[in-house]
Image (spheres, rainbow, N blue to C red):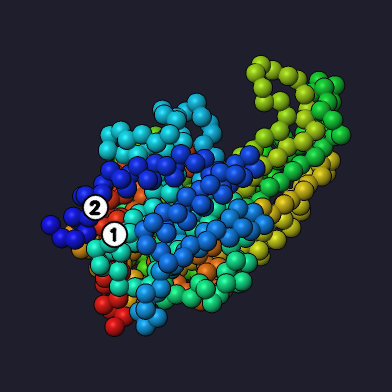
Amino acid sequence: MNKIAGYIEENRERFLEELFDLIRIPSVSAKSEHKEDMFRAAEYLRKSIMDAGAYKAEVYPTAGHPILYGEKMIDPSLPTVLVYGHYDVQPAEPFELWNSEPFEPVVKDGKIWARGADDDKGQLFMHVKAFELMERTGLLNCNVKFMIEGEEEIGSVNLEKFCQDHTEMLKADVILVSDTTMIEKDIPSITTGLRGLAYMEVEITGPDRDLHSGLYGGAVANPCNMLAKMIASLTDENNKITIPGFYDDVLIASDEERAEMAKRPFDEKDYKASIDVNALAGEEGYTTHERLGIRPALDINGIWGGYIDKGAKTILPSQAFAKISMRLVPDQNSEKIAKLFEKHFISIAPAGVKVKVESLHGGQAYVSPIDTIEYLAASKAMEESFGKKPIPVRSGGSIPIISTFEKVLGIKSILLGFGLDADAIHSPNENYPLFNFYKGIETIPLFYKHYADMKK
Ligand code: BES
Ligand code: MN
Ligand code: MN
């Protein structure tokens, strides 16, 4: 057995127990009642990284949740890998849909079940353990830095400033991130693109109070009706977004690129079955993976207003609300799109209602080239551990801070993710297969090995 497999074998159970202790801290960034938990999670990771062999690790408070930074600089002439991850998780609600406690991890059917099991505690912890492994087995051949934040799920609000304030400390040759998916557990892939995001909240106000829907209905503009109409008009019959100027900066993929994308294995029947729908829908003229990877999308994330409790209440509501996100692609600019949205949404408001539009957060799309040493090292690492060359894939998801890293630090990221679509991240019953967890710990040291070799 080689050193990597041997070390993993000997420490399998401990790795898992340590991950479980991290998962047990309910570090939900969106909720203020978890403020203390955010510190506990950052502190837990600080200790983990120190125990694994870092020379220093520190929890940096921010205006929001703390950032953990740690490093082991072994030789300035060696390449430096900066690991990024996030210890914050999405809220676990609705609790009643979980088959086990969200913050009490269990192993069942070969998977870890818990909030954060994959996104991103399970995935980031692979890096902590891979670092420990390299450290203990004498394989460490690069300088390592860790930057782990607690606000990814709420838009990484304080990380850009942290980067600006610490450009020297964060100097590195590459940023390595495990916070994405691969195609299947036996079809490795590397994420070469992330979509950007513009996240909006809208508020429609009609009369100054809820009215009797018999006495007023039909004579006064109903904010819920109006909101429904306005939102419906944001896409046309071909599912194209109707906001003027929205597509102006969208880079059109070449035929070659599209032909390359079409080669990726995809079973539409399985895909539909996996989410229990009988048909797929999206922009006319594009395949499912084009719709996800190279085309923007507009979705309502939540919509509310009026009476939503049990039974019937005959009212004409005073207000209606929606949260609307737009997934963006290169070269769309998130702030520009947010402004276009706001201007357009206000312009389509019918008489009799007032409209308020707020931009909650956003970020730019990211693309990673596939002809760099960094990509090739990742590709070789996966090929070695999976026995198959990984496929480059443009993901539909977003990690807005990745493009900010490029802008502020001038460093490209490699998105070496080991999650699966089936892991139900952000959903009830989030899970992460043990196979993927250990495969990640096995693959990461191989990345360092090939990367250091290729940088020579
Ligand atoms: N890890 C995900 C993003 C992801 C998952 C990318 C799978 C590709 C494949 C990340 O934690 C996330 O959920 N990002 C948010 C964006 C954020 C600004 C709330 C997202 O994509 O909704
Ligand atoms: Mn994530
Ligand atoms: Mn997430």
Horizontal placement of 266 versus 39: left or right? Answer: left
Q: How many marks?
A: 2
Circles 1, 2 touching at the beta carbon (< 8 Å): yes
Q: Residue at x 52, y 73 (%)?
A: 169
| Image quarter of residue 388 | bottom left
Residue type, label 2: Ile
Where's the C terminus, which quadrant? Answer: bottom left
* Residue 179 in view, yes or no: no
Badge 2 local density, few (<14 within 10 Å), some, or many (20+)? some
Q: Position of residue 263 (x, y in %)?
A: 29, 60
Residue 198: x and y, percent?
61, 56
284 in relation to 384, above or below: above
Mark carried by residue 8:
2
The answer to whether 151 is drawn above or below residue 306 in the figure is: below
| Furthest residue in direction top, as rendered | 311
Corner quadrant of residue 250: bottom right
In this figure, which residue is indicated by the disc labeled 1? Answer: 133
Q: Residue at point 70% right, 61% down?
A: 339
Helix, strand or loop for disc 1: helix
- Residue at image location 63% in from the left, 67% down from the top: 161
Disc assigned to residue 263:
none
